[in-house]
Each structure stands twice: as C-alpha cells, then as structure tokens.
Image (cartoon, helix red, strand yellow):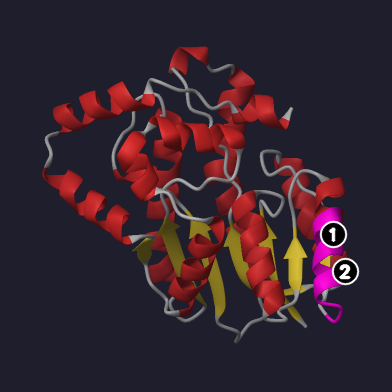
Amino acid sequence: MEYTLVTGACGGLGRAFAEILASRGEPLYLTGRSEERLGALASALRARYPTLCVRYHPCDLSESEQRTAFFAHLAEEGVSLCRLVYVAGVDTQMAFEKFTEPMLLLQARVNFEGAVSFVRGFLSFCPQGRVGEILTVGSMSASTPMPYFALYSASKKALEQFSAGLREELKSRAKVTCVLPGGMPTRDDIRENIKTHGFFGKLSAMSPHSVALRSLRAVQKNRRRVIIGGWNKLLYYTEKAVPMSVKMRIICKIWGKTEKNFYAIEE
C-alpha cells in the first residue's frame, strides 16, 4: 500500500486535500504540529469513509530533529509513499522590524527548509520504478517582492524555483508541480485581510477545496507551475508590465494596513 503524505493537514487547505483524496479512497498519511488535531481529522475521515486507510504522526517542520524522527517513524512502520503534498506554511505579515528571531526562523524553516527536507525524505520512501508526485504549495505572493510580506514572498519564491529545478532532475522519477494560489479564507485573520484588500482581494481569493482540486489535477498532468484562478493569472502577467517602483508603492499601501501573526495564533 502506498500513501499520500500531506503536511499542514490541520490547516484549511491541508484538510481540503485530505478530504478530496479520502473521497477517492486513496490511503493518507497526515502530519502537522498538533497530534490532537491530526487525530480528530483522521477520526472524521474514517467516520465518513469507513474503509479508508489513514495514518498520522505529528511533526514540527521547523525542527530538523523532528523531521528526522518523522521519517524514522515511517521506516519503522514500513510505509511506502506515492505522493507528497507540501501544504505547510507560515504566513506572518507585518513590518520586518517587528519580527522576533523565533518568528523569523519559524517562517523561513517551514516555508522552505521543511519543504526541501520533506522532498528528500519522500524520495527515500517512494519505491524505485514508481513515478511519484511532488506537489508544493507556493503563492501568488512569490510573483513580486512584497513590503510587509517580504520574508513570506521570498520563501515562496525560493520554493517555486527549487521545485522547477528539481522537476528537471527527476523527470523519470517523479512529477513535480508548484502551484501559486491567491488568498484563501481559512482563518478569521485571513478573511479580514482579504476584506481589507477590497475588490482585488475578493477576486483573488478562492476556496481551499477549489485550490486543492485544481492543484491535484495540475500535478497529475505534470505541470511545472500553475497559477490558480483566472483573475490571478491575469494579475500575474499584467504586473510584469508595471515598473517595480510603482508595484512597491501600491503593495506597501495595501499590505501595510493589516497584520497577520501566525506565530501568535499557533502559540
């Protein structure tokens, strides 16, 4: 039996991926920071799909020791993987000078270091001769530098470029796709953030279910990069023609209005 490994399974998008895959009867291996929330999700999925094979094990993706321990646990269980869905991300948004060292490390490590580490781990558990699937969740925020969202934007750009380069290396080994969604109303602070962005924020936002469904289709087709949503595609290519100085002023004005502190929410 081969499992799909979903990181960030306790969040809105991670749960959407888990629910879609569960409805297809695909075996799931879920991870996130909270064992309690993982257990609740696994129980809910089993209740809806009694024959579903779902396992879980907690892991703080910002900690190297926990990542190593996670894959050691998979080895002990004799788990084989066919797909990695790296959803986990930290989306703290505020003036850079307000960041503490723990906040910086959490965001940089989960958004990029954890992804690289889990891709390497996944390949060790994907059987030879099996063409696996690696789906990384980037962001529309990676399309341009972003004041007040600078670290998040940079880390997602790094993830996008890593995924593109890896795709060429692994042509006969795995399909690798990075998807770029816009905002998703998964938490109260994100809903408020989308509202603050006005008309453009509403057009850019999509439901986690829709994003997850389109993302799975994209990796099955072995797309290198996919921008999720028609409006987001238009915005992505239109902004290429806008001078950097103009883009920075607009983003600074809009994104400086609100803050999101993922660290505070999780703690």
Whether residue 199 is in magenta: the answer is no
> Which of 13 and 27 lies nearest the eye of the viewer?
13
Q: Are marks 1 and 2 in contact (CB under 8 Å)?
A: yes
Report the magenta residues as a range: 40-51
Whether residue 44 is in magenta: the answer is yes
The answer to which quarter of the image holds residue 108 is top right
Q: Secondary structure at mark 1?
A: helix
Q: Which image quarter is the N terminus in?
A: bottom right
Look at the image and tell me whether residue 120 can be seen: no
Look at the image and tell me whether residue 208 can be seen: yes
Residue named by callout 1 = 73
Residue located at (56% from left, 62% from top): 209
Left or right of 117 in this view: 151 = left
Q: Position of residue 251 (x, y in %)?
A: 29, 29
Residue named by callout 2 = 77
Using the image, determine if residue 116 lies above or below residue 45: above
Left or right of 127 in this view: 74 = right
Residue located at (86% from left, 78% from top): 50
Q: Main secondary structure of the magenta part?
A: helix
> Which of 64 and 46 lies nearest the eye of the viewer?
46
Q: Position of residue 47 (x, y in %)?
A: 86, 70
